[in-house]
Every structure is written in structure tokens, then in C-alpha cells.
Image (tube, rainbow, N blue to C red):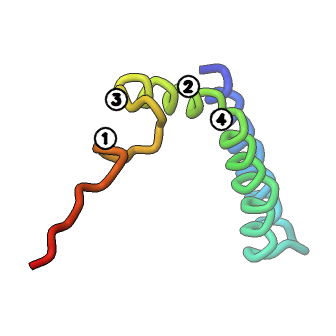
């Protein structure tokens, strides 16, 4: 919950930076867009992805534990040796 609050606050600050860039006499809309993307969206996406890694790892482990797949390969269990094929 705290990381969501920090993310929203950061996007708000970057949005205000972009608005200031766009309304400045020497600024431009392209500069505002680049400010928003390069200072806001990309770093925030990277940070949230990295901070969410433990949660994703735990969810993957829970999913693997609930399937009952002993080796985690995801393949159907079967005989170790294939049945002999009869010709003729």
C-alpha cells in the first residue's frame, strides 16, 4: 500500500513538472512529453517491477506447490520407458 502511495505522489510531481515544461515560454509539448516519460513513467515502471519481484516469486511458489508437480517441469507423469512398438 505504501509503495502505491509513493508511486502516485511521484507521478503527480512529474505531471506538474511536465505541465510547467509545456506552459513555459521556452518549453514545448515534446519536452513535456519526454519529461513525463523519462522522469516518470519509465523509472516508476522499473521500480514497481523490481519491488514486486518478491511478491511474484511467492505467488509462483504457491502455484507450483498447489499443483502437486514434484519436479516442476509441468509435464504429465508417465512411464519412464516407452512401450515397445510391435511391427507387422
Left or right of residue 59, residue 87 in this image: left
Left or right of residue 65, residue 78 in this image: left
Against 65, residue 46 (above or below) is below
Q: Quadrant of residue 35?
A: bottom right
- Whether residue 81 is visible, yes or no, is yes
Secondary structure beneath label 3: helix
Q: Quadrant of residue 52?
A: top right
Q: Between tags 2 and 3, which lies in front?
A: 3
First-in-chain label (4 vs 1): 4
Whole-angstrom CA distance, mark 3 to mark 4, is: 21 Å
Q: Between tags 4 and 2, which lies in front?
A: 2
Relative depth, front residue between 52 and 38: 52
Labelled pair 4, 1 in contact (Cβ < 8 Å)? no
Labelled pair 4, 2 in contact (Cβ < 8 Å)? no
Whole-angstrom CA distance, mark 4 to mark 2, is: 9 Å
Mark 4, residue position: 53
Amino acid at each position: 500500500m505504501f509503495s502505491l502511495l509513493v508511486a502516485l505522489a511521484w507521478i503527480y510531481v512529474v505531471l506538474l513538472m511536465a505541465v510547467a515544461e509545456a506552459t513555459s515560454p521556452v518549453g514545448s509539448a515534446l519536452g513535456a512529453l519526454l519529461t513525463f516519460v523519462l522522469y516518470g513513467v519509465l523509472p516508476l515502471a522499473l521500480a514497481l517491477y523490481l519491488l514486486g519481484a518478491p511478491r511474484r516469486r511467492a505467488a509462483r511458489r504457491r502455484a507450483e506447490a498447489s499443483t502437486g508437480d514434484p519436479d516442476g517441469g509441468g509435464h504429465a507423469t508417465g512411464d519412464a520407458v516407452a512401450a515397445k512398438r510391435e511391427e507387422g
